Amino acid sequence: MPDARQPVRVTGPRAVTPTSRRARKKQATRQAIYDVAIRLFMERGYDETTIDDIAGAADVSRATFFNYYASKPEILHEIAAEALEYARCTFDRNFSRAGDSIAEKVRRSLRSFAMIVERDPRYYQTVFLDAMRSQAGFVAANRDAANRLINDLTGHMRAAQRAGELNPSLDAGQLAEMLTGIYMYAILSYILKGCSGSLVERIDKAAMIFLEGCQAR
């Protein structure tokens, strides 16, 4: 589990380290463009940052930028996809812990998300707000990552139902969607309200309401 004292960010282009020198150089260039773009989005704002700004700060030509990204929104879509993948891995890690109750698994997962957002709210504002309001294509670009998250959570919900912890009459897929919705909306609401108050407390209360409604009696 990440150190909650430090900001946790998705890190951009994920791939097995290429074996050839040329491929490693291309991967490094893509990562550099990604890193610079996120920094500029946070410093200046998404709308105020141009492709020329990104290319200049990354020390590449405009043409080189387009070799790696078709548009500025594509970078944000990649951030959002990475954030969804991070959420999936976090849920998987916590739900795979033997001996923990479903309540512990749900609360630990949601609290971990809340803690990292509280540490670095400006970054997550870029992830959630700028990505969602960017050009059309956000939903399509992140459909696969979102489906992986929901599918994995559905499996965890079914396992908890088989273990007698969750009400077996409830639809596991809907439970997974509800849990994902808690995660997404709590963070979005926190950002929209100026990051005031404790997101950890807010998301913990939401987790308890979720559990009250679906735990086996």
Image (spheres, rainbow, N blue to C red):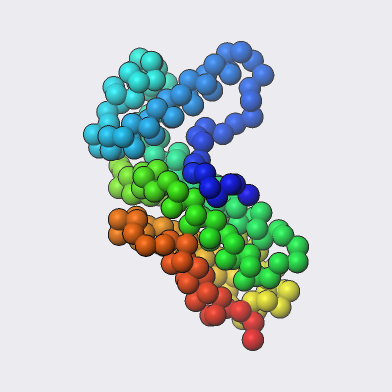
Percent of width and height locating residue 91: 60, 57
Q: Tell me which residue sits at (27%, 31%) in the image.
A: 49
Q: Residue placed farthest to the front in the image? A: 5
Q: Residue placed farthest to the right in the image? A: 98
Q: Residue placed farthest to the left in the image? A: 48
Q: Tell me which residue sits at (54%, 16%) in the image.
A: 25
Q: Can residue 127 be seen in this view?
A: no
In which quadrant will I find the C terminus?
A: bottom right
Percent of width and height locating residue 94: 65, 58
Place residue 16 in its image quadrant. Answer: top right
Percent of width and height locating residue 205: 48, 72
Q: Pick whichever, 124 or 81, lies toward us.
A: 124
Place residue 102 in its image quadrant. Answer: bottom right
Q: Tell me which residue sits at (52%, 21%) in the image.
A: 28
Q: Pick whichever, 150 or 85, lies toward us.
A: 85
| On screen, residue 64 above or below 1 | above
Q: Tell me which residue sits at (75%, 62%) in the image.
A: 98
Place residue 34 in its image quadrant. Answer: top left
| On screen, residue 159 above or below 195 | below
| On screen, residue 15 above or below 138 | above
Q: Can residue 102 be seen in this view?
A: yes
Percent of width and height locating residue 192: 30, 57
Q: How many marks?
A: 0
